[in-house]
Amino acid sequence: MKLHEVERRSNLSNEEFREEYLKKGKPVVFTDLTKDWPALQKWSAAFFKENYGHLQVPVYSSNYSKPGKGYMSHDKQMNFKEFLEVTEKGNTDLRLFLYDIFSPAPELRNDIRFNGPLAKTIKRFPFCFFGGEGAEVTLHYDIDCANVFLSQFVGNKRVILFPPSESKKIYHHPFTVKSLIDPVHPNYEKFPALKHVEGYETILRHGETIFMPSRYWHYMEYLDFSFGLALRSQNGIHTHIRGGFNLAAHFLLDKGFNFAVGNKWHDWKERKAFENAKPFEV
């Protein structure tokens, strides 16, 4: 496996971004895209605990991807303040993701700016992600096939990315948007095609924004307590169609078969992933 460092850019104009990264489907880290956001200095664990600690939030753990009736479901509801206190301490796999905090707290929209490349993002779906030290986001690509701009507030995340062209080499499970490989400690004996995979990596820090193009695979590791905000944009009708297919496959096929037969469905997907990767294992 070969991982290249994601390029880091400051003062990147809209035209430069469009020509050098968006059109080429290439990731980039903006070092200063959020410099004028009130949220950059305002949002903290203490701020959320004091002002929004009463909210009930859906919390997820590493059980999220395990086959069975709890597959792709949250573990429980928690008081937001309690969740933040637990994750600040570290050594927990609990995470809060795809959380629309702007629904119960619309005033927080005043703390972000849809500036530069973010001007064309989808305003209705800004999602927050919270986690403690050691929490991991398993390798996947976003089900709606959107471009993603993930801005980091507090803490650091390790981000590993693979382009869509590497999907078979990373043992993509059919009818899902996930892979179960560990890109930090790749097992070349079990997954020999990984020896031929190329991707990107970076450490995303406070105030930085990473652009992940449509259908890019991403793995994330919380290096300490941190949280971020994701804004999304679409490439056109083709991404809408593919995203619709993914949603149908997920809710009708993947979750349905998983609920009905559990481990047998998981085992079939894994066998197909190995079959698809076989031509690249030499």
Image: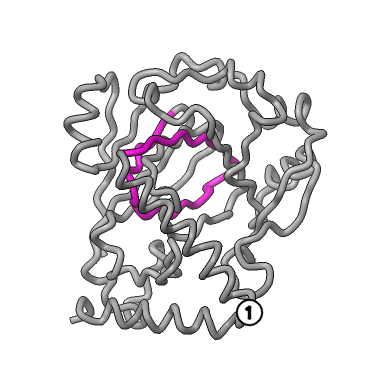
The residue closer to the viewer here, 194 or 205, is 194
Q: What percent of the width, then of the height, locates residue 17?
A: 24, 28
Magenta span covers which residues? Answer: 208-235
Tag 1 residue? 260
Tell me: residue 185, above or below residue 147: below
Tell me: residue 133, above or below residue 229: below
Q: What percent of the width, then of the height, locates residue 228?
A: 53, 36
Asked whether the viewer can see residue 205, the reply is no
Side of 65 where 187 appears, left or right:
left
Looking at the image, which residue is at 76% across and 24% down?
51
Looking at the image, which residue is at 66% across and 55% down?
60
**Numbered-mark total:** 1
The residue closer to the viewer here, 212 or 50, is 212
Q: Is residue 232 magenta?
A: yes
Kindly indicate the quadrant of the structure image that contains residue 61. bottom right
Q: What percent of the width, then of the height, locates residue 247?
A: 48, 56
Side of 233 where 53 appears, left or right:
right
Predominant SS of the magenta segment: strand
Looking at the image, which residue is at 24% across and 50% down?
4
